[in-house]
Structure formats: C-alpha cells, structure tokens
Amino acid sequence: MLNKLVGQLGTTLYVQIWEKRIRVTNIENGKIFDESPLVAIEQRNRRRIVVAVGNRASSVAGKNIEVINPFSHPRSLLRDFTAGEKLLQHIFKKLTDQTLFTPSPIVVLQPMEKTQGGLTDVEVRAFKELALGAGAREVQVYQGEELTRHTFDYAKVKAKIQPQQKASKNSGNQAVQWYLILLWVVLIALMAVFGGS
C-alpha cells in the first residue's frame, strides 16, 4: 500500500541517450532537458566538483576544468561512468521538485544508438547502475520504438522488459548448469586416474 502511494506521488523520467545529445522528459509535468551530454568538472582540493552540465558545459573555461562527454566512445554508448552519473544527477534535480519528502524518480532509460544486435547484459546493468547512482529508485533499460510523453506507459514498458530479463537469467543459469556438469565429469575422471594408481 505504501509503495503504491509513493509510486503515485513520485516522478517518472524518460531518459534518451545519443552520443551527442541527451533528452530527459518528466512524464508528469512535461519538463524537458534536451542538450549536449556534457559535464564540466573542476578539480578542487582533491575533489571533483560539477560546475556546469549540458550546453553550458562547453563554454566553461578554467585551468582545472575538464569537459567530458560520458557517452562518446567508438564502440559503446557509455564511456565514463562517474561523469555520466554526475550528469544524470544534475538533470534529475533540475526536472524534479526536490523537497525533503520527494521520492526518488522512476527512470526508463533508452540508449538511442550503438545498440545493433541488442544490448549485452553488461551494458544493461551498467545503464541501470548509472541511473540508480544518480538517484533513481527504480530503473528499466528500454529497447524499442521511441516513446513520447503521450504514448509513454510505464506498465507496458516494464511488462515488455521483464520477459527479456527472465530469458537472459535463464540462459545464464543454463550456462552455470553446464559448467557444473563439466566440472563433475572432470572430477570423476581425475578420481579414476589418480584413484587407480
């Protein structure tokens, strides 16, 4: 009952990531962040402080400031996990009404490119951890048609993702079972070889 109430009061964010663009839509109020996926980080007394995000980050200059695109890499859409987490934290704060009792948002994250052949389990987990680290309470990594605020239905997105995750877990379980069978056969063979001498 309490979880359902918190879910109704909370915010749902739809995060779309391209190499040169990030678009985050607050499904409830329609607020949108649609800018370059850049984060400017300044080194201060052994601490890394975010000084700007999005389009503003490219114009920030300073001796100890590094501008990072955490989603720009030739092989993958995730290059710098920590910078990506910081970027999402700032965007989430900007799009949600932050009060003492505001629940963390539910996030649907959709990589928009570099997904040929589907995302690996490692990529899905990395994107999930990225959003959770940025403050999400629940994350679904979505692969499919681009959604709009008006076609967005969290229950349908979650229902579509659940069978994919179960299939992935089952294939992982089968691999473990085959590994254990192989290990058992090797042990029996070793006992036969060394037991006979």
Image (cartoon, rainbow, N blue to C red):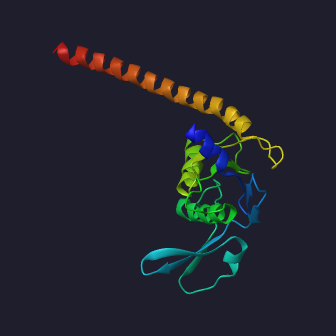
Which corner quadrant of the image does residue 160 belong to? top right
- Asked whether, in this view, residue 89 is left or right of residue 58, the answer is left
**Quarter of the image that includes the C terminus:** top left
- Asked whether, in this view, residue 195 is left or right of residue 70, the answer is left
Q: Residue at x 57, y 60 (%)?
A: 85
Task: Provide residue 34's location: percent of width, then percent of height.
Answer: 76, 63
Q: In the figure, 116 relative to 95: above or below? A: above
Q: Is residue 70 visible?
A: no
**Quarter of the image that includes the N terminus:** top right
- Asked whether, in this view, residue 74 is left or right of residue 144, the answer is left
> In front here: 113 or 128?
128
> In front here: 140 or 124?
140
Which corner quadrant of the image does residue 117 belong to? top right
Q: Residue furthest right?
A: 150
Task: Provide residue 140's location: percent of width, then percent of height.
Answer: 64, 43
Q: Residue at x 72, y 73 (%)?
A: 55
> In front here: 74 or 139?
139
Q: Residue at x 63, y 32 (%)?
A: 162
> In front here: 2 or 184?
2
Task: Provide residue 6's location: percent of width, then percent of height.
Answer: 60, 46
